[in-house]
Amino acid sequence: MATNRTFTMLKPDALESGNTGKIIDLILSKGFQIKAMKFTVLTEAQAKEFYIEHAERPFYGELVEYMTSGPIIAAILEKDNAVADFRALIGATDPAEAAEGTIRKLYAESKGRNAVHGSDSDESAAREGVFHFAANEIF
């Protein structure tokens, strides 16, 4: 059974481009409630740990550098079928392939600077949420 919470991060490019408010408004307009949110800057060690599953991929170093290049907003979102619905809302990793009206189609610059992260499973949502927030705050 799917949980009702998921994790997201608005990435440095979303904040840099001034699209934070628009992205949050879109998330709220699609029925998500924000249960926890924080503005922070990831250290290199934190970014490496968060994206550890990509450590062997050629883009890992670039991803870590990008995610530490500026502030992010981490958030826990709640809605029925949260993970799947949020993945649909953010769109494909490559904004050129993302569906019209999705966050990445509207606000991402490129496949590497794609505005937002969304958990890909209930298990990832729990792990990623606890990475940024105390477990009793979110799940």
Image: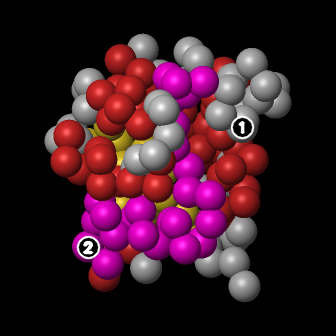
Question: Is residue 80 found inside the magenta-colored segment of the image?
Answer: no
Residue 29 placement (x, y as % from top left):
65, 44
Instruction: Kindly report the distance in space between the C-alpha atoms of the residues bearing marks 2 and 1.
Output: 28 Å
Badge 2 or badge 1: first in the primary sequence: 1
Query: How is the model colour-coded?
Result: secondary structure
Q: Is residue 96 left or right of residue 35?
A: right
In this rendering, the answer to whether 41 lies above or below 15 is below
> Which residue does the image show at 32% across and 78% down from the upper left?
135
> Which mark identifies residue 73?
none
Q: Position of residue 28 (x, y in %)?
A: 58, 47
Would you call the spot at circle 2 few (<14 residues within 10 Å), some (14-19), or many (20 or more)?
few
Question: x%, y% of residue 41?
Answer: 21, 38
Give the residues drawn in magenta, as a range.
111-135
Of residue 73 and residue 110, the one placed in the foreground of this image is: 110
Residue at the (47%, 31%) spot, across then down: 59
Q: Is residue 56 above or below residue 96?
A: below
Going by the numbered disc 2, the residue's amino acid type is Ala
Mark seen at residue 134:
2
The amino acid on which the numbered mark 1 sits, given as a three-letter code, is Gly
The residue nearer to you, when weighing 92 against 102, is 92
Residue 35 x %, y % = 42, 64
Task: Answer whether residue 101 is visible to the viewer in this image.
Answer: no
Residue at x 72%, y 85% (from the top left corner)? 1
Label 2's element? loop
The quadrant in which residue 139 appears is bottom left
Residue holding disc 1: 91
